[in-house]
Image: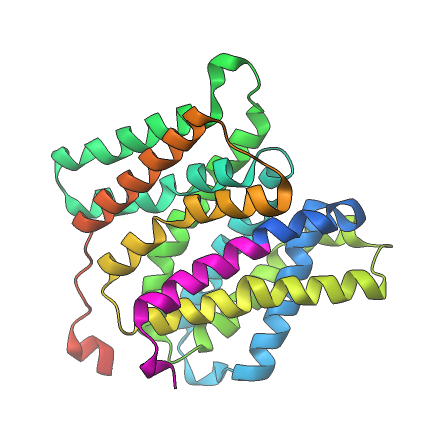
Amino acid sequence: MTDRVPAWSLAVTSIVVLQLGAALSPRLFDEVGPGGTAWLRLIFGGLMLVAIVRPRIRSYTARDLRAAGALGLATGVMTVAFMFALDRIHLGTLVAIEFLGPLSVAVMRSHSRRNLLWPVLALAGVLLLTEPWAGDVDPLGLLLALVAAVGWAVYILLTQTVGDRFAGLEGLAITIPVAAVATTFVGLPQAWGSLTPVVILQAIGLAILIPVVPFTLELLALRRLTVAAFGTLMALEPAIATVWGVLLLSQVPGPWQVVGMALVVVAGVGAERVGRRQPPPITATLA
């Protein structure tokens, strides 16, 4: 069925759904806090994936499972840092800063000093977005966004490893539960005592938006797109996040912030065009 749908549309739909989930997440902050929101999303997302996929854990080696566990930890750190940052800075700005992670990965893959232009361009865009000269910068929010950026970079590198080792969605059905367990010490204290039926239903809805639907669509898209083409589409994330921020969070960017967003998107496209990944050898894939 999905073979009839253009691969690029799967990737773009994934981005739109993911950022919609991010924009809706603050609605739970008052009840369970940012940490509780992140944790509940991962808990219910993990339960859904396990129920649907039913991963065959015994069929994988200890090395495979360690890779999946590491990816789960990176996913947990990235998710919690993102939620706490979202409680302090605008969604579009946060996603632009977070995008510095995958952008840096793409540039490092290129092994060319000329391509250092793209991080510099992205940094200029982030400066225009945050406007530190205006004195309204939230230092903790920026620090958390940078932690999320590092988490995203590690996530990309480990996702490639896990994607090469696990069939179908089985890797995802292992990593998300690991991420949920890893974030329990942050999420459970915030959510404890506030798990009403309404909160649980909202959390289940958010789990469908993030991680179940977008991560599944990403996997389907990556089966038919080159990593470089997929990464170029990912550069749209800051712009899409800004649109959702305007529509759902009333976070309207100023003129210079729009310019900054454009610089980040251009830097992302440019970096991913040179950050190609060589496919794994056929012998490794069949092993």
Q: Position of residue 111 (x, y in %)?
A: 14, 43
Of 177 and 117, nearer the camera is: 117
Q: Main secondary structure of the magenta part?
A: helix
Q: Is residue 19 magenta?
A: yes
Instruction: Report the residue at 39% width, 86% height from top.
Output: 1
Where residue 65 sits: x, y (%)? Answer: 44, 70
Residue 72 or residue 255, whichever sits in front: 255
The residue nearer to you, when weighing 231 against 23, is 23
Horizontal side of 41 relative to 237 (left or right) equals right
Q: How many marks?
A: 0
Residue 13 image position (x, y, % from top left) = 44, 64
Quadrant hosting residue 52: bottom right
Residue 31, visible in the rendered structure = yes
Q: Residue at x 44, y 58 (%)?
A: 15
Residue 98, percent from left and from top: 44, 41
| Colour scheme of the picture | rainbow
Q: Which residues are magenta?
A: 1-21
The quadrant in which residue 231 appears is bottom left
Tell whether 151 sits left or right of 87: left
Give the answer, above or below, for where 25 lies relative to 100: below
Quadrant showing the C terminus: bottom left
Residue occupying the point 28% across, 30% down: 121
Q: Is residue 63 visible?
A: no
Q: Is residue 55 left or right of residue 227?
A: right
Whether residue 229 is in magenta: the answer is: no
